[in-house]
């Protein structure tokens, strides 16, 4: 080198000299490391809200990676490369543990987290950075002109580095909003109706008090989340007109609530996190109080992070015996559910993996907590009432394993009457059988029959999953179950006046069930929508007290959806252009088959803010939820990341 050239080189700034001589090799590493740090800092606020130590970890990891990226551009050395590679690989190892066996700390210890877009992108960036740092540590850093191929390789690294960073940061900002308030709008001059005013008025009704302790328990070799140590939780059986006072004690590691499915409670007692209350934190207690106005078969379950908590075991039967009407010698409530303690429900990649695994291995269907043949006592001539409660997602099949075909049950051994659906009595039910009864999650069927003079009565599933045997003696012959007709509730029983139609329809709303691909809660998902919107920023149907509201439900998907309206009763008007030919149908959980259209109506007689959602848990978690909101009703509670209230 000439004296003139050496003098010119000496005058170059240090950073320019480093970049010219050896920094080109460090540029890809700096890009990957900077991208990983940016994603960590993007999702850091969410982790601070969920569990403060995790937020601190993400803050420190992000700052360390940004600092390393800057250092690589201004100075280099083997020690820095080795420490940087070790740090990135340590974070990757921690991520693998958190997604496979779970971490021993946090708000949900030893429970694997879902794999999302943001964390997958940051892990790939960290692996790429670690690989380059290892190569840099092994290669001499001596001076020399930057070769063209090194420059080209460094420039090309911008493409995957920037792409992964953009995708990860965007996914990190697409999580649950920090805070969403579901209060209804207040018209000018209209007085607001605060949520805490929508409670059962004091009265002299007979008081029934219960305590439900939400706690982990070992069941069948799995850790289940239970009420009072059992799955299902204790059966609550009361008389119509009783006042219930239920105390929830939360001994779980996560917040929870109790929702009274199908019961027309006052809105403040509905148990929906972020709408009618804050979720009850670990170690706290909460009391619900309401009057059981309607007789029928109902159930209760968590309505906080429902897709995970219900499948872990937080549910039970609620039976309200009517003060008038036929009685039974034997009255049993049967809950059909997934075997507890091994949840497979969840949005994103982990949820999809669970469904694929379930499709190959089959669901572990249980009845009242057992996967064995459940035997119930009954004598010849006894009048038996079986209350069938659907707490099962349904069979999963199809390209995305989200179809959720409802459970089918076949009673054999005697003819039977279906005396109620969803707690609503049917008019003049005739004795039928055997037929296949479709039971979607959230639905209930009440069967009544007389035990035969000899032999047992059984309830079977055409797929051979579960069996219930009532009585003793020889089992009845099993027919070709799959070839039996499918029970059609629209043609069963006898017609009768429909009170809701006598008032006329005041307002009609469209309920279009759809789906579209996108990113939700940091993960790629098939987002499920109502009128093209996904919760929590979903559709709101505004109603006024006293109105008769018609909902026209159009299913544009190839999936089954059980549409459940809180706090009200839906009267069926029409299905695909055909009105009911038999008994009027009064439901709270409507099973909508692929591409069906239903017209239903309800009377707006229970002021409040009410969820209206698909009860297939995965579909609701993916956004298929709306609100029926009465004008002027306000709530002090918020749902979202800041409060931790997550009703689905």
Image (spheres, rainbow, N blue to C red):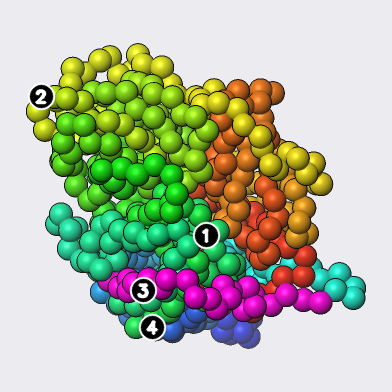
Question: Quick one: label 3 or label 2, which is nearer the N terminus?
Answer: 3
Label 3: which residue? 209
Label 2: which residue? 474
130 or 508, which is in the foreground?
A: 508
Location of residue 409 (image quadrant)? top left
Q: Which secondary structure, mark 4?
A: loop
Q: Is residue 212 magenta?
A: yes
- Marks 2/4: CA–CA distance: 51 Å
- Marks 1/3: CA–CA distance: 16 Å
Pointer 2: residues within 10 angstroms few (<14), some, or many (20+)?
Answer: few
189 or 111, which is in the foreground?
A: 189
Question: Quick one: label 1 or label 4, which is nearer the N terminus?
Answer: 4
Q: Is residue 123 visible?
A: no
Please tell me whether mark 2 or mark 4 is closer to you in this view. Answer: 2
Q: Is residue 265 magenta?
A: no
Relative horizontal placement of residue 127, taking residue 164 as reference (left or right): left
- Marks 2/1: CA–CA distance: 41 Å
Q: Position of residue 427 (x, y in %)?
A: 52, 33
5 or 520, which is in the foreground?
A: 520
Magenta residues (range) = 191-215
Label 1: which residue? 293
Please tell me whether mark 1 or mark 4 is closer to you in this view. Answer: 1
Label 4: which residue? 284
Q: Which secondary structure, mark 2?
A: loop
Please tell me which residue is depicted at 62% across the width and 31% down the height of the picture. Answer: 496
């Amino acid at each position: 080198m000439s004296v003139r050239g050496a003098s010119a080189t000496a005058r170059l700034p240090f950073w320019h000299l480093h970049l010219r001589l050896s920094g080109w090799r460090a540029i890809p590493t700096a890009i990957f490391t900077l991208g990983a740090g940016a994603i960590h800092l993007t999702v850091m606020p969410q982790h601070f809200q969920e569990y403060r130590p995790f937020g601190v970890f993400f803050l420190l990891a992000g700052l360390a990676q940004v600092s390393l990226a800057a250092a690589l551009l201004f100075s280099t050395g083997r020690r820095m490369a080795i420490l940087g590679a070790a740090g990135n690989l340590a974070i990757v190892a921690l991520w693998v543990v958190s997604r496979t066996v779970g971490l021993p700390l946090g708000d949900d210890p030893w429970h694997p987290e879902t794999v999302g877009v943001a964390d997958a992108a940051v892990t790939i960036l960290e692996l790429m950075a670690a690989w380059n740092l290892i190569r840099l540590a092994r290669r001499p850093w001596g001076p020399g002109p930057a070769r063209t191929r090194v420059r080209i390789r460094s420039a090309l690294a911008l493409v995957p580095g920037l792409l992964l960073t953009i995708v990860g940061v965007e996914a990190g900002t697409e999580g649950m909003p920090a805070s969403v308030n579901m209060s209804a709008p207040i018209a000018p001059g209209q007085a607001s109706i605060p949520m805490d005013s929508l409670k059962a008025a004091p009265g002299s009704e007979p008081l029934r008090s219960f305590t439900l302790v939400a706690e982990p328990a070992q069941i069948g070799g799995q850790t289940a989340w239970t009420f009072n140590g059992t799955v299902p939780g204790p059966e609550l059986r009361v008389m119509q007109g009783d006042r219930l006072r239920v105390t929830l004690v939360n001994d779980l590691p996560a917040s929870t609530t109790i929702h009274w499915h199908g019961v027309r409670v006052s809105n403040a007692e509905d148990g929906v996190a972020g709408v009618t209350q804050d979720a009850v934190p670990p170690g706290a207690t909460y009391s619900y109080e309401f009057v059981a106005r309607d007789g029928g078969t109902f159930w209760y379950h968590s309505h906080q992070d429902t897709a995970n908590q219900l499948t872990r075991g937080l549910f039970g039967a609620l039976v309200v015996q009517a003060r008038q009407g036929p009685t039974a010698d034997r009255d049993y409530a049967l809950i059909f559910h997934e075997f507890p303690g091994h949840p497979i429900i969840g949005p994103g990649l982990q949820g999809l993996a669970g469904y694929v695994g379930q499709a190959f291995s089959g669901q572990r269907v249980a009845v009242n907590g057992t996967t064995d043949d459940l035997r119930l006592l009954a004598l010849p001539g006894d009048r038996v009432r079986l209350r069938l409660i659907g707490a099962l997602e349904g069979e999963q099949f199809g390209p995305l394993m989200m179809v959720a075909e409802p459970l089918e049950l076949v009673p054999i051994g005697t003819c039977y009457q279906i005396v109620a659906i969803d707690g609503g009595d049917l008019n003049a039910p005739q004795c039928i059988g055997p037929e296949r009864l479709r039971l979607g999650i959230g639905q209930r069927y009440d069967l009544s029959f007389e035990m035969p003079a000899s032999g047992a009565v059984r309830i079977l599933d055409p797929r051979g999953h579960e069996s219930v045997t009532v009585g003793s003696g020889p089992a009845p012959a099993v027919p070709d179950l799959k070839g039996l007709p499918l029970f059609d509730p629209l043609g069963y029983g006898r017609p009768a006046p429909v009170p809701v139609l006598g008032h006329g329809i005041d307002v009609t709303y469209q309920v279009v069930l759809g789906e579209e691909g996108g990113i939700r809660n940091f993960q790629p998902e098939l987002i499920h929508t109502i009128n093209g919107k996904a919760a929590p920023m979903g559709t709101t149907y505004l109603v006024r007290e006293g109105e008769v509201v018609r909902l026209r439900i159009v299913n544009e998907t190839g999936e089954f959806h059980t549409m459940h309206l809180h706090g009200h009763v839906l009267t069926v008007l029409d299905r695909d252009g055909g009105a009911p030919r038999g008994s009027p149908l009064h439901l709270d959980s409507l099973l909508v088959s692929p591409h069906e259209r239903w017209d239903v109506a309800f009377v707006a007689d229970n002021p409040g803010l009410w969820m209206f959602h698909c009860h297939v848990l995965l579909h609701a978690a993916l956004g298929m939820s709306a609100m029926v909101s009465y004008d002027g009703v306000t709530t002090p509670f918020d749902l979202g990341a800041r409060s931790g209230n997550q009703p689905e």
